[in-house]
Amino acid sequence: MHTTLVSQVLNGHKCFTEEQASQLAIYMGLNTLETDYFIKLVQFERAGTESLQKLFKRHLEQIQRQVSEIKSRVPESKELSEQDRAIFYSSWQYALVRLLTDIDRYQTVEEISRRLNLSVSRTQEIIDFLCTRGLCDVERGRYKRTNKNTHIEASSALSVRHHQNWRNKSIELIDKMNPDDLTFTAPVSIARKDIDKVKEILLNAISDISKTIEKSPPEECVYLGIDWLKI
């Protein structure tokens, strides 16, 4: 678009086309409902008959009601509700999409979609969920992870699902291993007295790794899975 036309639109003398509105919605980082509403506003403005304007007005009112219902179901809190945690932990995709938004080159729907080989619509659905639950923020079309808590207790049934999701994902990752990757599987026989000793070694390693991660700038996403289970 020529800058003159943009000025005319912003001054109320012209109107965006639906195609221009769609691109602008992407640039502004609007979620699905916001994009629908924005494009309906454009359609309402461009409608050539009163009956068509009434139709688009009904559509706008319907979206407004839908947004109000969503806001009433999503209370603002420091932690996710049980219902939202059930969605978040239903798939590894939610956590990984959120992690990727920490990395500068993966902060748009299109970039995340390509990185994870997910459809744009599925990626947008996940991003919309993360943003409406305060797990991500958006600015000028770029998404960024927030510090909102997603902690899940070890006693929760969702904790089991969380581990299963990432174990299943790890099988897929093993099939695509690079020379720099590391995996280790070793069923062993061991003295009872040494079981807790090995567990303590692993816990100390996890603590050291966590301290390293905390100080490390986000540049890549890496999966870490450690198992030490009696058979």
Image (tube, rainbow, N blue to C red):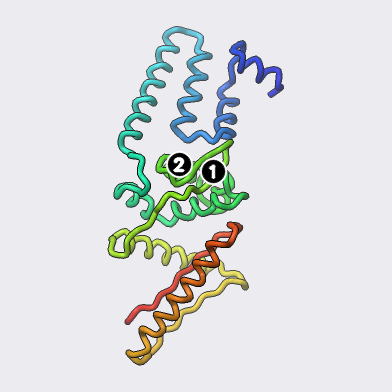
**What's the distance in space between the residues labelled 2 and 1, CA to CA?**
9 Å
Q: Which mark is residue 131?
A: 2
**Residue type, numbered disc 1:** Tyr
Asked where in the image residue 64 lies, by quadrant, the reply is: top left
Where in the figure is residue 63, as x and y percent of width and height? 39, 26
The residue lying at 59 percent from left, 12 percent from top is: 12
The residue lying at 60 percent from left, 58 percent from top is: 217
For the residue pair 189 and 215, the one nearer the viewer reads as: 215
The residue lying at 55 percent from left, 60 percent from top is: 221
Q: Answer yes or no: do the residues labelled 2 and 1 have beta carbons within 8 Å? A: yes
Where in the figure is residue 35, as x and y percent of width and height? 49, 30
16 vs 197, left or right, is: right
Furthest residue toward bottom: 191
Q: Which mark is residue 133?
A: none
Crowding near pointer 2: few (<14 within 10 Å), some, many (20+)?
some
Asked where in the image residue 178 lies, by quadrant, the reply is: bottom right
Where in the figure is residue 62, as x and y percent of width and height? 36, 23
For the residue pair 133 and 56, the one nearer the viewer reads as: 133
Q: Give the position of the C terminus as an image quadrant.
A: bottom left
Where in the figure is residue 29, as x and y percent of width and height? 54, 36
Residue receiving disc 1: 143
